[in-house]
Image (cartoon, coloured by chain):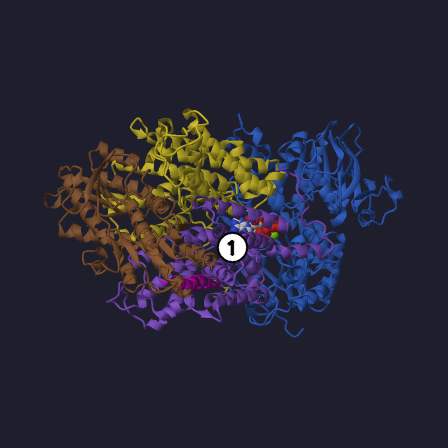
Chain colours: A brown, B blue, C yellow, D purple
C-alpha cells in the first residue's frame, strides 16, 4: 500500500484512515494483525496504516495526513482521551466520522467508540479474586500508568468493588508505568514485607506476566491452586501467553480484551460510517450493547473472564492469534 | 660524536589551516648536542613547527628525519617520544590527576597489564621534582598547583623521557626569575651530557644566554640560521620583523621623564585579602605608570585582580579620582574607570569561539548602539580601529579569536581592556607570550594611557614590563616591601622581589643610565 | 603512512573563506530540509498543500517553543531537562488555582478569577525556572541532574494534582491562543514566529543577548569583562521556564485539554532539534534560526514518513536513521567537526 | 551569586588535607545511603531482611551494568545514550539469529546453534558500540546526538525484528545467568560485583584504565603524552555496548522474557545514578565505586518508598524530590561545587 494513491478509490470503496496507537505491546500487535488481515480479506480501501507510538502529537499529525489524503472515516485509538478533543472537532467540521477503539474520548464528537468496558475488567477481577480468597487476605495490584484512562478505570473499579464487597481484603496498590521491571521490583519488595500475600491483580498481562512469573518462580511461590501458599493471580488482556499460564496453573484467570473484535468492529463501523449508515443505542447482533454517550455512541464489546474452565474456547482471540 | 647526522632535519615543511598558511617551505636542522634557538614574531609558525616535529600534526608537505632516519608513523606517538620530548606552549597538564600521574602519564608501568605501583610512582615523582627544587606533594592534584609549579611539572616530565632531543616552546613565559635560573641550570647540565635543544622564546637575552645557534622565522618562512655570536640583537630583531630597527631606546622608556605631579588618580588604602596579601596601600597619579612587582606567591596578581573586582577584599578601600569604588564587583570597577588585563588569557581573557570583534568589544557593549542594542556595524568599526591601533594580525574582525596566534590573542585582551578608555588600567603580565616587537607596541600603548592623563598599574614579574614604569613597588609574601623610582637596577628589584631587601633602599634614587 | 607527504597544490585560498563557512553553519540543515521537501513532493501530492504545511507548522509550535528555550539556555552554557515537565505542570497548576472547587471532573481551589489562568501559568513556569536557577547557581549543584530530578518531580506533581486525569474543562480564554486562526494561519504559528524573531534579534543585536554567547563560551572571561554572569544565567533559566509554560498554553488550546502526559518524553526531541540545528551542547555557539530548522526537520520527517506510508513497525527505526543521516548531511554541509 | 571567587590554585595548601577531600568525593553518597537505611529501618521491619536486600541487589544488577558502561564512557569524556536500547535490541537480534524459523510464537532464522546466543548477543552489543565509535570518531559527529539517534533507531529495530512482541521462548542457556542463584545469592549479583571490581581495578591500577582519565581530562594532552586517544575511546565505546548487551542477557533471565520495552527510558536513571555517584559529565572524573553508590541510592529509594506505602499518585513526585535532596546532601558532604 503506497501513499501516493490516486483519488479514484479502488473498487469504489471509500478510503479509511487507520492509526495504530503503538507497535510495542503484544496486545496492540495482535490488533494490528487483525486489522491488516480483516482489511485485506474484506477488500477495504485503507490509506497507509500509521503508528502514533503512544504520542498524541504524532496521532494528531497522522490524522491530519488522513484528512489531506482524502479519508472518509478515521479509526484511531487515542491513548490520551483529553488531548484528542480539538482534533475530533476538526474532523467533525470536515464531516469525517471517527471510530475510537479502546478509549472513550472525553470531549468531541465520535461516530462510535469500540471498546470493552474497563471498569468491568476491574470489577470482574475483583469479584473473582474476592471469591477465590474467601473475602480476606492481601492483594497486590500492579497498576498501569497513572495517566492512562484505561488503567485508571480498572484501578477505580477494582478499588470500589473491593471496598464494598470484600472489605476484609487489603489492597496494596503499586504504580508501574506499564513496566515489567518496575512491577517485578515493587512486587518483590511487597513480598518481602508481606510474606502472607495471597493475591495479585495484574492490570496488563502483556506488560507484567513474564516478569511476575519469573519472580515468583525464583522465590518458589508458584504453587498450584489448592496448595497452601498458592497466590491467586488474575491478569488482564487475554494474550496467548496468559492462556498458556492458565493451562499450566501458574495464574488463575484473565480478562480477555478482545483484540479481534476491536479490529473487526472498528473496520465494520468505519465502513458503515463512510457509507453514511447510522446506528442506535440498544443490543446488537454480536452479543454486545450500544450505549449512547454525550458525544456519540459506544459499542461495549463483551470481555469474558477466562479461567481454567474455558481457556480452550476456540472463540477466544488469544487462541487464534498469530500464525 | 659517533653519529654526525643531525638529531632532526626538517625540510620543505608546509602547513596550512584553512586560509591561514602557518608554515611555507620551512626548514630547520639541529645538530647533536646543539642548543638551537627558534625565534620569530607571534604567528610566525614556531608552535606549528613544534607540533609537526613532535608528531602531533602532519605537515602538508616536506620531509622530516631524526638522526638520519625517517620519522615514525604519525599515530605512533610513543616512537616519536623516544626521539623527541617537548614542553608545549599550551599546557598539557591534566588538572584532575595527581602530580605524580601527570609526570608519568602513559608510562606508569612497562606492560599494559602490569598493575601500577602508586607508592613507587610517587617516590619517583618526588625525586624528579626535587631535582628542580619544586616543593609539591606528588599526590596533590595538579589543578591545585600554581602556574609556575605546573610549568615545572611539565618541564620535568619532558626532560625525564631521556630523549636526546628536547623542544621547549616558550618554557620561560610562566616562570619567574628564579625559576628561569633553575631551568637554565638544568638545561646546561643536560647539554653537558650531549642533549640537543630547540628553544623558543620571545626573550632574546635568554637566547644569547643559552643557545649556540639561532633560526629566525618570519611570516611562515625560514629567514636565516646563524651562530648566535654572529648575530647581534639588532640584526636578529631585524630578521624577525623585516624592518630596519630604529633607535636603541624604545619610545616608551621611562628613563628621563620627570615624575608626574598632581592629585592621585588611584588610591588604595589598607587593602587586605586574608591569606594572600595584607594592608597594602598605594597611590598613583595621573600620567604615571606604576609597577607592582612580585614573584609567584607574593600576592601581587591577586591584588591586581581585586582592583578589577574579581575578589572581595576583607578590608580596605579603593578610590579612583576621589570616588570610592565598590569592591568585589567587576561592573562597579568598570564603571569607576578601571580597565583590566587578566593574567591568563585562556582562562579569563577570551571567549575562544567568538570573533575578534566580539572579544575586543566585550566590555563596551553598552556603547555600541542605542537602547541596549549592539550594532554589528559599530562593533566592526570599533574592532577595526583596535586592530589597527594595536597592530593585531588577523584575517579580519570576524575571525574566531581562537585562530589567532597567542601573541595576537593577547593583543585582543588588551584591546578589550582599553575599549572602555579606563582611568586606571590594571594590567597583569600584559606582555605574556608576546614577541619583542609587539611587546614594545603594547607597552607603548600602556605608556600612552598614562601620557593622556590617566594612570596604569602593571602587575608583573617581568623586568621588561617594569622598565616602562615610573615607579615600581615590590611585593613579597603579601606585603609591599620596597619602592623604586626609575633608575633601579635589575639586581635591586629581583632581590626585593625575593624578600632580600633592606627598607633603606626605598625611594632612593640610584640613577644609572642603561 | 609516512610523514613525508607530497606537496598537493598549495593554492592560497582567498581570505574570508573561513568566515563565510562559519556563517553558513546555521544554514547547514537547509540542504536536509530541501531533500525532505523533494522526497515529500515525490511521495504524495498532498505534501505541498497549504493545509498540510500549515498543519506541520502548527504541530511544530509547542516543540519549537521548548527548543527556543533550550537553545537560549544551551547558548548560555547550561541545560534544562525539566522543560518537558514544565509544559505540563504549569497549566495544571494554573487550572488548579482558577477552577472552581466543585462541579467539574477536575476540581481546583478557585483561588483566582478565570482570566488570570494564562498569567498564572506563565508565572508558574517562571517560578520553576527560578527554582532551578537557585539550585544550580546558589547551591552550585550539577545542572543536568538538578533538572533531571526536576523533570521527575514536576511530572509527579502534575500526576498528583491532576490525579492522572486529563483536564478537559479549561476556560476558553486559556485555550484560545492554541486553537484560534488569524488570517487563515493558526495563531500559534504567528506567535511562535514572533517569539523566534524576538529571540533571534535579541541574540544578534542586544547587549544582553550577546552576553549569552560570552557566558556560554567562557564564563570566567565574561565575568572578568564585567558581565553579570549569574544574574543573566538566572534570567535565562526563568525565561526558559516561562516559554515552556507558554508552550503548555498553546498545547492545551491545540489539543483541547491538558493531558496528563503532556510533553512526556519530549526532551529528547528538544535536544535533537536544538543540536542538529547547530547549537553547541558546550555553550557559546548556535543561533535561534538554526534551532528552528532543527525543529522543522524533525517535524517534516514525521510528516513525510506518514505520507509515504512507512510500515508502522519500521517507523521508529527510520526515524532514528533519518536523525543520523541529517546529522551527517549537516556535518558535511557545514564542513565542521562537531565536538 | 556574588562575583567574589575563591582563589583557585594559588597557594598549594600544606598538602594532605585537600587531597583527602578529593578522595572522599567518591564517598559523598554514603551519608545518603545511611539516611535511606535508617528511614527504611524505621519504616518497615522487612527492610533489613536478607530477602529484601538481596532483592534490591538483584533489581539493581541490570541498571548497574549500564551505569558501569556509562561511567567508563563518561570518564573518557564521551556519552552514550543508546545503551538503553542496546539492552533490548542485542538480545532480540541474538534470538533472531538462533531461534528456528518456524514453530515458535517468535520465529528467527536459525542461522546459529542455540548455545551461541550469549556470545552473539555480546557481539551485537560490541558492534553497536563500534558503530557509534565510527560515527563519533571517524565522521566526527556530535556524540550526544549520534547516540540519541542510535537510541531511537535501535529501539525501532527491536520493534521491527520482534514485531513488537515479547519473546518468551528464549533458550534456557540464555536465561540462566539472570535467574540462577549461587550460594543463596543471585548469580547476577556475583557477576555484577565481579565486573565492578574488575572495572574499578582497571581504572585504578592499569595504564589503559588511567588513560581514560587522561583522555577525559584533556584529550589533547593525553595525545601529546602518547596515548592513542581515538583507539582507546573506541574500545571504551565497544566495551560499553558489550556491557549493555550483557545487561540484556541478565534482564532476560531475570524477567523471564525479552520484553519489547526492555530498558525503555532507563537512560535517565543511568545518568542520574552515574552523576550523583560523582562521575563528571565533562569527563576525567569519578570512580566506579561512586557510580555503584549512585545505583544503590536510586534503587533503595524505590524500595523504601514501596515499603513505606507512599500513595501511588505521589510516588513519582517524591522520587524526584529525593534525587534532588540526595544531590544536595552529597554536594555538601563532599564540599565541592558541581559544575
Ligand atoms: N590548528 C590551527 N588552526 C588554524 N590556524 C592555526 C592553527 N594552528 C596555528 N594556526 C595559525 O598558524 C599561524 C602560526 O601559528 P603558531 O602558533 O605556529 O605561531 P607561533 O609562531 O607559535 O606564535 P606565538 O609566538 O604567538 O606562539 C597563526 O596564524 C595561527 O593562527
Ligand atoms: N583547531 C584550531 N582552530 C583554530 N585555531 C587553532 C586551532 N588549534 C590551535 N589554534 C590556534 O593556533 C595557534 C597556535 O597554537 P599555540 O600552541 O601557539 O597556542 P597559543 O595560543 O599560542 O598558546 P598560548 O596562548 O599559551 O601562548 C593558537 O593561537 C591556537 O589558538
Ligand atoms: Mg607559539
Ligand atoms: Mg603563542
Q: Which region of the structure is painted magenta?
A: D235-256
- Label 1 lies in what chain? D
Q: x%, y% of residue D190?
A: 49, 68
Residue at (82, 41) in percent of width and height: B484
Is residue D18 inside the magenta stretch? no
- Say which quarter of the image contains residue C37: top left
Q: Is residue D238 found inside the magenta-colored segment of the image?
A: yes
Residue at image position (55%, 57%) is D293
**Residue carrying label 1:** D300
Residue D280 seen in the figure: no
Residue A311 falls left or right of residue D146 = left
Q: Would you say A167 lies left or right of B9 here?
A: left
Does residue B420 appear to the left or right of B399 in the view shown?
Answer: right
- The spot of residue A29 in percent (x, y) is 27, 54
Q: In which quarter of the image is residue A85?
A: top left
Position of residue C9 measured from the top left corner of the image (x, y, whole percent): 44, 55
Q: Which residue is drawn at 47% across and 36% down?
A: C241
Q: Where is residue A147 in the image (x, y as percent from the top left)?
A: 37, 43
Left or right placement of residue C173 versus residue B84 in this view: left
**Mark 1 neighbour class, 10 Å CA radius: few under 14, some 14 to 19, many 20 or more:** many
Please indicate, yes or no, whether residue C183 appears anywhere in the rendered image. Answer: yes
Query: Which of the 4 quarters of the picture holds residue B438?
Result: top right
The residue at the point 32 percent across, 62 percent down is: D167
Q: Is the magenta stretch mostly helix, strand or loop?
A: helix
| Element marked by disc 1 | helix
List the single residue furthest toward the right.
B504
Query: In this figure, what is the number of numbered marks?
Result: 1
Query: Does residue C262 lie above or below B67 as drawn?
Result: above
Q: Is the distance from the Cβ of mark 1 to the nearest ligand 2 atom less than 8 Å?
A: no
The C terminus of chain B sits in image quarter: top right
User: In the picture shown, does residue A194 fall above or below B315?
Assistant: below
B503 or D94, nearer to the observer: D94
Amino acid at each position: 500500500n503506497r501513499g501516493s494513491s490516486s483519488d479514484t478509490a479502488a473498487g469504489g470503496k471509500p478510503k479509511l484512515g487507520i492509526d495504530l496507537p503503538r507497535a510495542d505491546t503484544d496486545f496492540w500487535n495482535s490488533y494490528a494483525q487483525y486489522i491488516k488481515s480483516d482489511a485485506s480479506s474484506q477488500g477495504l480501501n485503507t490509506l497507509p496504516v500509521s503508528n502514533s507510538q503512544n504520542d498524541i502529537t504524532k496521532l494528531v499529525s497522522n490524522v491530519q495526513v488522513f484528512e489531506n489524503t482524502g479519508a472518509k472515516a478515521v479509526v484511531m485509538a487515542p491513548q490520551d482521551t483529553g488531548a484528542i478533543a480539538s482534533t475530533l472537532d476538526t474532523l467533525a467540521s470536515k464531516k469525517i466520522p471517527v471510530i475510537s477503539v479502546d478509549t472513550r474520548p472525553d470531549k468531541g464528537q465520535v461516530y462510535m467508540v469500540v471498546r470493552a468496558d474497563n471498569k468491568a475488567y476491574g470489577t470482574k477481577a475483583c469479584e473473582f479474586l474476592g471469591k477465590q480468597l474467601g473475602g480476606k487476605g492481601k492483594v497486590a495490584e500492579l497498576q498501569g500508568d497513572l495517566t492512562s484512562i484505561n488503567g485508571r478505570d480498572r484501578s477505580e473499579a477494582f478499588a470500589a468493588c473491593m471496598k464494598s464487597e470484600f472489605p476484609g481484603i487489603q489492597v496494596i496498590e503499586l504504580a508501574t508505568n506499564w513496566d515489567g521491571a518496575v512491577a517485578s521490583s515493587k512486587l518483590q519488595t511487597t513480598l518481602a514485607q508481606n510474606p502472607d500475600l495471597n493475591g495479585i491483580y495484574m492490570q496488563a498481562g502483556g506488560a507484567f506476566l513474564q516478569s511476575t512469573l519469573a519472580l515468583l518462580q525464583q522465590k518458589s511461590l508458584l504453587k498450584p491452586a489448592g496448595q497452601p501458599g498458592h497466590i491467586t493471580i488474575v491478569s488482564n488482556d487475554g494474550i496467548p501467553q496468559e492462556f498458556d499460564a492458565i493451562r499450566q496453573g501458574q495464574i488463575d484467570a484473565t480478562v480477555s480484551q478482545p483484540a479481534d473484535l476491536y479490529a473487526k468492529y472498528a473496520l465494520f463501523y468505519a465502513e458503515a460510517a463512510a457509507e453514511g449508515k447510522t446506528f442506535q443505542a440498544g443490543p446488537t447482533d454480536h452479543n454486545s450493547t450500544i450505549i449512547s454517550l454525550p458525544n456519540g455512541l459506544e459499542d461495549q464489546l463483551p470481555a469474558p473472564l477466562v479461567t481454567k474452565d474455558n481457556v480452550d474456547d476456540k472463540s477466544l482471540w488469544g487462541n487464534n492469534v498469530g500464525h | 660524536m659517533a653519529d654526525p647526522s643531525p638529531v632532526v632535519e626538517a625540510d620543505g615543511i608546509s602547513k596550512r589551516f584553512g586560509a591561514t598558511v602557518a608554515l611555507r617551505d620551512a626548514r630547520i636542522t639541529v645538530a647533536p648536542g646543539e642548543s638551537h634557538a627558534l625565534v620569530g614574531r607571534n604567528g610566525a609558525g614556531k608552535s606549528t613547527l613544534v607540533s609537526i616535529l613532535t608528531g602531533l600534526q602532519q605537515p602538508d608537505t616536506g620531509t622530516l628525519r631524526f638522526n638520519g632516519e625517517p620519522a615514525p608513523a604519525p599515530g605512533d606517538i610513543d616512537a616519536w617520544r623516544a626521539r623527541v620530548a617537548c614542553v608545549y606552549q599550551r599546557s598539557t597538564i591534566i588538572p584532575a590527576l595527581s602530580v605524580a600521574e601527570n609526570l608519568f602519564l602513559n608510562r606508569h608501568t612497562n606492560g599494559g597489564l602490569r598493575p601500577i605501583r602508586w607508592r613507587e610512582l610517587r617516590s619517583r615523582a618526588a625525586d624528579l621534582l626535587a631535582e628542580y627544587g619544586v616543593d609539591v606533594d606528588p599526590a596533590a592534584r595538579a589543578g591545585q598547583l600554581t602556574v609556575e609549579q605546573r610549568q615545572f611539572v611539565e618541564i620535568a616530565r619532558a626532560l625525564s623521557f631521556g630523549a636526546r632531543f628536547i623542544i621547549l616552546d616558550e618554557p620561560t613565559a610562566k616562570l619567574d626569575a628564579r625559576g628561569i635560573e633553575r631551568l637554565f641550570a638544568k638545561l646546561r647540565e643536560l647539554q653537558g651530557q650531549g642533549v640537543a635543544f630547540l628553544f623558543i622564546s620571545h626573550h632574546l637575552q635568554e637566547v644569547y644566554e643559552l643557545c649556540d645557534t639561532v633560526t629566525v622565522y618570519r611570516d611562515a618562512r625560514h629567514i636565516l640560521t646563524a651562530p648566535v655570536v654572529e648575530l647581534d640583537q639588532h640584526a636578529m630583531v631585524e630578521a624577525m620583523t623585516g624592518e630596519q630597527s630604529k633607535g636603541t631606546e624604545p619610545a616608551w622608556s621611562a628613563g628621563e621623564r620627570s615624575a608626574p605631579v598632581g592629585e592621585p588618580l588611584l588610591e588604595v588604602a589598607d587593602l587586605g585579602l586574608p591569606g594572600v596579601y595584607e594592608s597594602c596601600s598605594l597611590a598613583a597619579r595621573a600620567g604615571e605608570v606604576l609597577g607592582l612587582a612580585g614573584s609567584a606567591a607574593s600576592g601581587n596578581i591577586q591584588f591586581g585582580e581585586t582592583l578589577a573586582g574579581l575578589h572581595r577584599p576583607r578590608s580596605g578601600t579603593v578610590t579612583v579620582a576621589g570616588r570610592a569604588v565598590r569592591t568585589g564587583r567587576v561592573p562597579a570597577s568598570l564603571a569607576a574607570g578601571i580597565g583590566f588585563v587578566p593574567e591568563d588569557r585562556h582562562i579569563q581573557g577570551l571567549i575562544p569561539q567568538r570573533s575578534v570583534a566580539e572579544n575586543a568589544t566585550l566590555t563596551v557593549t553598552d556603547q555600541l548602539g542605542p537602547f541596549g542594542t549592539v550594532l554589528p556595524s559599530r562593533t566592526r568599526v570599533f574592532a577595526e580601529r583596535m586592530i589597527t591601533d594595536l597592530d593585531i594580525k588577523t584575517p579580519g574582525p570576524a575571525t574566531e579569536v581562537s585562530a589567532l596566534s597567542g601573541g595576537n590573542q593577547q593583543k585582543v585582551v588588551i584591546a578589550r581592556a582599553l575599549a572602555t578608555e579606563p582611568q586606571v588600567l590594571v594590567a597583569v603580565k600584559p606582555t605574556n607570550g608576546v614577541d619583542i616587537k609587539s611587546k614594545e607596541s603594547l607597552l607603548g600603548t600602556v605608556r600612552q594611557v598614562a601620557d593622556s592623563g590617566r594612570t596604569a598599574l602593571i602587575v608583573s614579574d617581568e623586568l621588561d614590563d617594569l622598565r616602562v614604569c615610573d615607579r615600581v613597588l615590590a611585593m613579597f609574601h603579601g606585603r609591599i616591601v620596597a619602592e623604586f623610582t626609575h633608575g633601579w637596577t635589575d639586581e635591586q628589584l629581583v632581590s626585593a622581589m625575593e624578600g632580600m631587601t633592606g627598607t633603606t633602599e626605598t625611594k632612593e634614587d640610584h640613577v644609572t643610565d642603561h | 603512512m609516512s610523514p613525508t607527504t607530497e606537496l598537493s597544490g598549495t593554492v592560497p585560498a582567498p581570505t574570508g573563506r573561513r568566515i563565510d563557512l562559519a556563517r553558513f553553519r546555521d544554514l547547514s540543515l537547509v540542504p536536509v530540509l530541501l531533500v525532505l521537501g523533494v522526497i515529500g513532493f515525490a511521495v504524495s501530492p498532498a505534501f505541498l498543500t497549504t493545509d498540510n504545511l500549515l498543519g506541520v507548522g502548527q504541530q511544530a509550535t509547542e516543540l519549537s517553543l521548548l527548543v527556543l528555550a533550550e537553545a537560549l539556555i544551551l547558548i548560555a552554557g547550561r541545560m534544562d531537562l525539566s522543560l518537558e515537565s514544565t509544559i505540563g505542570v504549569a497549566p495544571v497548576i494554573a487550572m488548579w488555582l482558577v477552577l472552581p472547587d466543585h462541579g467539574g471532573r477536575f476540581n481546583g481551589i478557585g483561588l483566582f478569577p478565570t482570566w488570570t489562568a494564562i498569567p498564572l501559568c506563565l508565572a508558574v513556569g517562571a517560578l520553576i525556572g527560578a527554582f532551578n536557577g537557585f539550585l544550580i547557581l546558589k547551591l552550585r549543584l550539577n545542572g543536568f541532574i538538578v533538572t533531571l530530578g526536576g523533570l521527575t518531580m514536576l511530572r509527579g506533581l502534575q500526576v498528583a494534582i491532576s490525579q492522572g486525569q486529563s483536564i478537559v474543562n479549561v476556560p476558553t480564554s486559556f485555550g484560545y491562543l492554541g486553537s484560534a486562526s488569524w488570517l487563515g494561519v493558526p495563531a500559534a504559528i504567528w506567535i511562535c514566529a514572533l517569539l523566534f524573531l524576538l529571540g533571534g534579534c535579541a541574540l544578534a543585536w542586544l547587549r544582553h543577548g550577546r552576553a549569552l554567547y560570552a557566558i556560554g563560551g567562557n564564563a570566567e572571561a565574561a565575568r572578568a569583562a564585567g558581565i553579570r554572569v549569574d544574574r543573566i544565567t538566572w534570567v535565562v533559566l526563568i525565561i526558559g521556564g516561562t516559554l515552556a509554560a507558554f508552550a503548555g498554553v498553546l498545547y492545551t488550546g491545540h489539543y483541547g485539554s491538558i493531558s496528563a502526559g503532556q510533553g512526556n518524553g519530549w526532551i529528547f526531541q528538544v535536544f535533537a532539534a536544538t543540536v542538529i540545528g547547530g547549537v553547541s551542547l558546550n555553550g557559546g555557539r548556535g543561533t535561534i534560526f538554526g534551532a528552528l530548522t532543527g525543529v522543522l526537520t524533525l517535524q517534516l520527517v514525521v510528516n513525510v514518513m506518514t505520507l509515504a506510508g512507512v510500515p508502522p513497525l519500521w517507523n521508529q527505526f527510520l526515524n532514528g536513521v533519518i536523525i543520523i543521516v541529517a546529522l551527517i548531511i549537516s556535518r558535511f554541509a557545514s564542513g565542521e567537526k562537531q565536538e
